[in-house]
Image: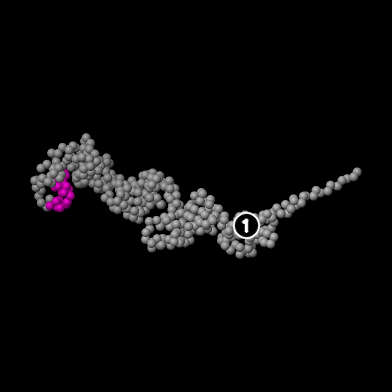
Amino acid sequence: MDQTIEQPTQQPEWFENFIAHYDTQNPQSGQIIEGTVVRVDPEGICLDLGLKREVILSARATEHVSKEYLASLSPGSIVPVYVISAASENHEMEISLSRGLEQQTWETVEKLLQQGDILTLEVVGHNRGGLILKYEGLRGFVPFSLVPQLQGIRNPKRAEAIKNSLVGTQMDVKITEVDQEKRRLILSADSAEQEKRIKRLEAFRRGQIVKGRVVKVVDFGVFVDLDGIDGLIHVSQLAWKKVKHPSEAAKVGDEIEVKVIEIDHQRRRIGLSRKALLPGPWQTISEELKAGDYVEGIVTRLVEFGAFVKLPQGIEGLIHTSQIGYSSHQVPQNAIKSGDKVLLKVLEVKPDRKRIALSMRQVPIERQIAWSMDTMDIVDTVEKQPFVDEVIPEQAEAINLPT
């Protein structure tokens, strides 16, 4: 029996050409491709770019790449390379690792711009318009108007000193503009600071006890820096006693402990209280007032059995109806009204019951006159001379005494 020997099927010519040339479809100029490090030696870096043969990056070709980055490379590392010129019959493909890394960095900052991330970068210098910061192989620019440390500074010498002091420091920034074609990378330290403030503000809770530094004292209170957040202690929250001016209770630079009593997210401020952490007035009143003392007060409200008076110690005492008025001839209901300032004698202090008994009628007339005239000269005169029962009409009218 004849046996037929099958001849191998011959592949079409087009298929052979495809096999011979499919991996020589070289990348084009301007393209970014990834390469795998095959080895690293003193001669350079050997890369596998998925072509017919490996490509060598000479040591000279990597001189613009940071030493730290080169030291991190090992067989298997993936690196981006930029195709400067494609390969041809008479020309080897020319590639650049530094430009590949730069292109990769531009793509990264584009993503960071969209994500709104905060970056911590080194300030490497400054020019006429702003600070220069370094992000990997790129240089970013922060306009002086977006640097919190320079805001509000009018003195040129002071501003220049601040700029110089910032060089070499780390600064938190956000990317606000990326333009690779113009090689523009614009940053903002102010935006980063605002975002950090919002996050810090969200961490505070009412009733929380915190420490801060006094940064400003004004007529209506004290501003405290709480790690970048402005906190305000209103003058009424500085102490239990009445404070004529906040400077009596605190000064710039003081480190104080305060209680959070209000959080204003819109204004990014926190209401604070210092007196909430101080001993209450009833705990110390026995050291400050005792029976027989004289004290001023403000009438806060009238009730059926008397009048409540706010004392300088920050607490209220009671004037019984029988003790209202500086004369027994006065009708209690007509002698005082809410808001009146009065001079009082302390009859009794009972801290355990939170009660202070006061009297207007038991204030000696010489004290009434001296107090009403708001001068101690009258008191000195009265103390040196026997008191005369006759009262000058004008003085009697000033303190509601009968003439």
Nearer-the-camera pick, 94 or 4: 94
Which is the main secondary structure of the residues drawn in magenta?
A: helix
Task: Say whether residue 369 is magenta.
Answer: yes
How far from the left and from the top, in percent, is residue 285?
26, 46
SS under mark 1: loop
Residue at x 43% of width, y 53% of height: 190
Q: Compared to 317, does 226 lie above or below?
A: below
Viewer-side residue, 69 vs 26: 26
User: Is 174 situated left or right of 217 in this image?
Assistant: right
> Along the horizontal axis of the image, is 401 left or right of 80?
left
**Residue 117 vs residue 176, the one in the foreground:** 176
The residue identified by callout 1 is 29
User: Residue 292: where, in percent of width, then height?
Assistant: 19, 45
Viewport quadrant of the C terminus:
top left
Looking at the rendering, the stretch of residues picked out in magenta corresponds to: 361-381
Residue drawn at point x = 20 percent, y = 44 percent: 342
Which residue is at a point 57% across and 61% down the rendered structure image? 65
Q: Is residue 182 in view from this perspective?
A: yes
